[in-house]
Each structure stands twice: as C-alpha cells, then as structure tokens.
Amino acid sequence: MVDLKPILEDVSSGDLSVDTALERVEGFTRVDDFARFDTQREGRNGVPEVVLAEGKRPSEVASIAERALEKEGRVIVTRIGEETEAALEEVASSVDYTEWSERSCIMVLRTAEYEPPQVDGKVTVLTGGTSDIPVAEEAATTAREMGCDVETVFDVGVAGIHRMFAERHRFATADCVVVAAGREGALPTVVAGMADAPVIGLPVSIGYGAGGDGEAALLGMLQSCTVLSTVNIDAGFVAGAQAAQVARD
C-alpha cells in the first residue's frame, strides 16, 4: 500500500512532478506502449524486477534497460541473444558498472549512484555437471544482486559422488543451498540429506532420450524422499531469488 501523503506533499511543494508522482502511486513506469517496469517489486519482497530478453526485440530490451537505469539505477537482463547483447552494449557504454556472463547470457548494469543491498545471508550454488553451470550462474547472480554472499561449487554430481563429499564444508555454513542438476537430477536429494540449511532443487534441461530435456530431473526432485523445494526446469532466476529470500530472513 503506497503512502500517498508524502507524495502529495512533494507535489504541492514542487519537489515532485505530477508524472513522477503518478508513477509512484501506480508502482510502475511505462516504456512506450510495450512494457511496464515494476519499480516497487524489490521494496515489496526484496526481489528485483528482472528483464527477460527472450521473446523481446533487441530495441525493446534496450529501451526497458534504459528506463530501469533511470528509475532504479540498476537493471538485470537474462536470456540475452547476440543481437540483444549488441543493443545492450550501447546502453552499457553510459553506465559505470557492467557485469556480463557469456555462459549464462545474463547482464547486470549499474549507475554510480546505485547502492547494492547488503544482507548477512549466504547462499551456496552447486551443480551436478559442467553443463549445468549456465542455469546455476543465473541463480547465483540473482542471489548476489539481492545482497547475499554467494559461493559456487561446480561439477560434483553423483556419477563421482566423492567429489561432493570433498566439498561438503563449502555448503555446511550456508543459509540456503541451490543444487542444479540435469539428467536424473539426483544430486539435490543427496545434498538435502546432508545439509543443515534449506535446499532448492533446480532441474536443468540436460539429458536425452526418455525423460530428457530436464523432465526426469524435475520428476526426480519432486519425488525426493529428503525435504527440498523444487523450481521449474531451467528456472535459475526463480531459484536464486527464493534462495536469497530464505537466506536473509
């Protein structure tokens, strides 16, 4: 619920334009006629508004990113293709901080005035294999941008489970653990049986034949006999955001 009194007072004193006041009341800012960027989501639940590039024209993504930087001082863009990357490079040339992950196709842009959130929560992100890293990095970036301390541990799947045992100390002190795995998706069940913290299973669309494309991984995590939460296939952003919410509570 928006507190109208300070907004009206700022309009009355001339410190706030009518258009800006309307945006604060509505809770979003319009980008031409094709997008409405939620400017109050992070204030409501701590999860930033993130721009999914997939399915959008490069020019649309660039316009949304520019407006988000203007209003919030930061923008996170996921699932970026080559043409969209080129469009965002022009936007990035005018800001002070750029983080680009070619592997996970995610970009973070910040202005000099933006102050990143800082919380005490720690999130550890594990993968079953190297092929799971792109989705896992999306989760890690999201949790990091929500202010958490994030550690990643890659390629510790059940095909050589001694690798995970050797790294157990790296998730022993976490407040929440994200485990990304494709194929049969067994690793989250194992980790959930050993970790003190809540575990989020992140099925990845790696695997072929019957149960391929992440379907077996998803069903295996949903049928886990150990206690864990499970997000949708390749839903790295959702897993990272949920982990950060858990870790900082």
Image (cartoon, grey):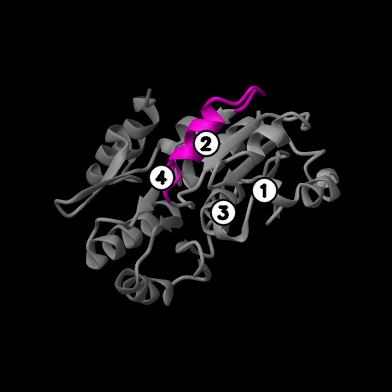
Q: What range of the chain is rendered magenta?
A: 209-228
| Three-letter amino acid code of the residue under disc 3 | Thr
- Contact (CB < 8 A) between labels 3 and 4? no
| Three-letter amino acid code of the residue under disc 2 | Gly
Image location (x, y in percent) of residue 248: 66, 34
**Which residue lies at the image location 48% right of the left edge and 36% below the top edge?**
218
Closer to the observer: label 1 or label 2? 1
80 horizontally vs 17: left or right: right
Query: Which residue matches tag 4?
Result: 49
Closer to the observer: label 2 or label 3? 3
In this view, 126 is above or below 77? above
* Residue 223 shown in magenta: yes
What residue occupies the far left of the structure in this picture? Answer: 33
Query: Which residue matches tag 2?
Result: 46
Precedes in sequence: disc 1 or disc 2: 2
Q: Is residue 157 visible?
A: no
- Contact (CB < 8 A) between labels 2 and 3? no
**Which residue lies at the image location 43% right of the left edge and 41% below the top edge?**
211
| Three-letter amino acid code of the residue under disc 1 | Leu
Q: Which mark is residue 141?
A: 3
Callout 3 secondary element: helix
Callout 2 secondary element: loop
Tell me if mark 4 has few (under 14), some (14-19) or many (20+) residues whose alpha carbon lies within 10 angstroms of its own.
Answer: some
Callout 4 secondary element: loop
| Three-letter amino acid code of the residue under disc 4 | Glu
What is the magenta segment's predominant secondary structure?
A: loop
Query: Which residue matches tag 1?
Result: 126
Tell me the quarter of the picture where residue 154 sits.
bottom right
Image location (x, y in percent) of residue 159: 69, 50
Q: Is residue 105 visible?
A: yes
